[in-house]
Each structure stands twice: as C-alpha cells, then as structure tokens.
Image: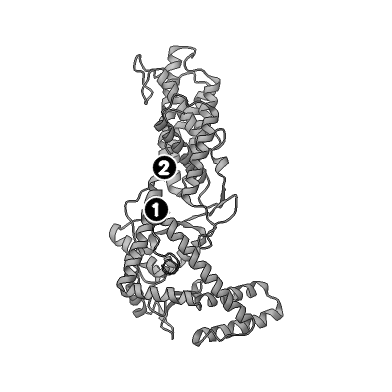
Amino acid sequence: MIAWQKYSNGATPQSTGIKGDHLVGDYYVRFENDLKAESQVLINKIKMADLCDFTGAELEKLDKLLVALTKLDEIKDEEKISKLHDEIKELARNNTRVMAEAKQMLLEWEEGKPEVIELWKKMNGWVYEGFDITYKRIGSDFDKIYYESNTYLLGKEIVQQGLEKNVFFKKEDGSIWIDLTADGFDEKLVQRKDGTAVYITQDIGLAQQKYEQYKIDQSIYVIGNEQNYHIKVLQLICKKLGMPSADNIFHLSYGMVELTTGKMKSREGTVVDADEIVDEMVSTSQRLTEELGKVKDFTAEELKDLYDTIGLGAMKFYLLRVDPKKTMVFNPEESIDFHGFTAPFVQYTYARIKSILRKEMINSEGSMVNGENSDSQNNLHKLEKEVVMNLEQYPGMLEQAGDEHNPSVIANYVFNLAKTFNSFYSAHSISNAETEEKKQLRLRIAGMTANTIKNGMQLLGIGVPERM
C-alpha cells in the first residue's frame, strides 16, 4: 500500500490492463526494493561505526550485537557470526524510514482510519479478483475462506487472556512474548510493542475459530516445510493456553517446488507466476498434440478444452506424483511427455479405452448394449490377472492415501494401472479375442479400468478427455 501510494499515480488493473494480483505484487516488490536500499545504507553506516540513526532500545541492542560480533571474530565462529550479521540486518530493516511508514499504516489500519481502510479494501479486492481468475482456471474452489483481518482481533483477545494466566509475559517496551526455551524453542513474540498483531497472533485466533465452528477431529495445515517451526510453536502455544484445538493441529509439511531456473522469491520478484506456468503448459500441450497429428476431426472449442485438460492435468499430476514431504524440481517439458510417468500418458490410456468401448458399442460401465455379459473369469491370462488384481487394490490405495495424507499414492496407482492395461492390450486383442466370452470379459476389464482411472484422476483434480 505504501509503495502504491508513492509510485502508482493511481494505477488500477483497469487502467493498466494488468491482472489485479500481478499489479499489487509489483508494488510488493517495489516496497522490498526500497527497504533493501535503505537498510543497506544503514548497514554501511554501521560498518563505519556511525550509529546516529539508532536510538533507545534499538541502539542498545545494536551495541550488544556489535560487541558480541567483535568477540566472535576473535574465535572465528562462522555460524554464530552469520547469525549475528542476520540480526544486524533485520535491525537495520526495521529502522528504515519506509518500514516506519508501513508500521504507522498498520497502526492506522488497526485503528480503522477511513482512508487506510478504503485503500486496503480496494487493493485487497484487486488481489482477490486476480486469485479468483486463477483458481477458476485451475479448477480449485473453497467451501470456506478465513481472512486474517477477521481473526487478528480474536487472536489479540486470546493473547490478553494468556497474559492474565501468565502464559505470556510483557517486556519493558510493551511487547508480549512467550518463553518456550524449556521446550527447546526460543522466546516468541505474540504481539508487537505498538499493540499490533503478528502472524502467530492471527493463527491462534484462526485455530480457535475453526474449532468452535466445526469441532473438527483434525485441522490439516497444508503449508511449506519452511513453516515447520512456526506450526510447532503454534501448537505448543495452543496447548499451554489449554485450547481444545491444540490436539487436532496437523501440519502436512509440503516440500518446496523449485523450477529448473532455481528458487523463487516473491519479495524480490524472482517468481514465475501461476498464470504464466498454466499458459506455458497449455501452449506446450497444443504444440505436442498437433505434432502427433490426431486432432483433425476436432472443433476449435473441443481443441481448446483438450489442450487445457492435457496441460493442466500434466502440471497437477507432475506435482502430485511426488511424496508431499519431498522437495522437487518442476520441469514443464518433462511433465507433458506422452510416454513418461505423466498425466498425458494416463489420459491417453483412458481415451484409448473409451475408443475401444465406443467401437464395440458398449456403455461406460463396460456392459454390452447388444449382447450378453459374461461372468466367466476362468483361465485368465497372466496380464489379464494383473489388471484385475490392480483394480482390486484401488479401495486400499485410497485408504492409504487418506491415512498418510499423501495424494502421490493415487497418482502412482493410476499410472501403474494404465501401464499394466497397456501391456495387457498390446499382448491380447479385445475385438479379435479367441472367443466371444473372452471378448466380453476383456471389455468388462477395459470398462472397469477406464472408470477407475477416471475416478482416481478426478480425486487429484485432473480431467480425462474422451478423445485424444
């Protein structure tokens, strides 16, 4: 908001043609650049022993850090030296003019200053509109949305209650903390000295709010593994406060997703936006599909849907096929390989089966429209047995995925099912089976395979085209 006021000249998504979340993101980066530049000036002054920009508690803390740094320099403790340098950098960042402006704006926001609230609502609206476009495109929706702006007050109220119970303590500067050193952690700030909330304050309020509304058995936090410490501290604080929500907190600690170009940092603007990745996936899907040359009888609308289904499916499957706890590198080109461990491979198998079933004039359940079903399962060939055994494992795979909070179990299962079916189909003809009875059996196996693939892929949020 500070950066937008300084640099935008009133720019809006409508006036610039820039998607709302992208526009606000640009000013997020602009603020960080200002903050970096100002803090670097202070750090350079500190190196020259010029501490005139610091006063009071900040000056006292800086003096202590510099004394400690001098002592560590003598014993060459690189790890502790690095930590002290980080603390000095953070102190410099918090002492910049631009950070002071942001802190003042936060105070005014919490006080409900009309012009600040108006700007906040306007810029939030731009972001949410942009998010909605992306969520709709990738097929994500939410039953309930919680806003930090509606949970921080409850969090602050709980902090005050904890202060009265001596769970928290107040420092001389008015900030409120909890001492978790006996539990193997540090002291943790839960409310700033100016009375404003921090992330943990809002999360305490949210944990209480969700429990009161739903009495849930388990609240699963799907958050990157960089927040492991934060969630452990949150759960510990909730336990010390005696909150019933403490026991149901579960952190599904996701490994980070990196690109072949390296790690992304939103504050520095070194990001590849979700919209850009989706565009690239759909474009790659179109190029590879057209190279195969099997879409001449598709309408323009059908082709658009097909490219979206293949591109988005490839992206989701590539991400979900890896155990969520593992860090991974996302390679767009590799994710859309029609012959690899990918969604297009599974989707093509499904479309192939549907083509077979259409040719034999049967419905999606594998039952003959003209003719009788065969219940005979005697004398199954080895590959027929493998497909049937794979199909029988599906309920167990779903249970395992749920128990382990691990969607990669389903991704691996549907891929292996598709691979097994393709091996079976390459070895045994369906339309030219040895007997009519054998043909009916294989059609039923094919129909059940298609239904299971479709169901599994839908659980991963991935569509399967009837034709490819």
Residue closer to the observer: 462 or 325: 462
Residue closer to the observer: 242 or 405: 405
Answer above or below: position of 138 versus 465: below
Badge 2 element: loop
Q: In the rendered image, is residue 16 in sight? A: yes
**Furthest residue toward left:** 213
- Type of the residue with mark 2: Gly
Q: Residue at x 45, y 60 (%)?
A: 25
Q: How far apart are marks 1 and 2 (CA)?
A: 18 Å
Residue closer to the observer: 441 or 308: 308
Q: In the rendered image, is residue 220 in sight? A: no
Residue 462: where, in percent of width, then height?
A: 43, 39
Please identify the quadrant where the N terminus is shown: bottom left
Q: Nearer the viewer, mark 1 or mark 2?
A: 1
In the image: residue 275, left or right of residue 70: left
Residue 272: where, in percent of width, then height?
A: 52, 52
Answer above or below: position of 406 versus 452: below
Residue 438: where, in percent of width, then height?
A: 45, 16
Q: Name the residue under label 2.
A: 461
Q: Residue at x 45, y 44 (%)?
A: 400
Q: Which residue is drawn at 37% across and 76% down?
A: 107
Badge 1 element: helix
In the image: residue 289, left or right of residue 68: left
Q: Name the N-terminal-most of marks 1 and 2.
A: 1
Residue 131's label in the rendered image is 1
Residue 392: where, in percent of width, then height?
A: 44, 32
Q: Residues within 10 Å of mark 1 (few under 14, many from 20)?
A: some
Q: How crowded is mark 2: few (under 14 residues within 10 Å), some or many (20 or more)?
A: some
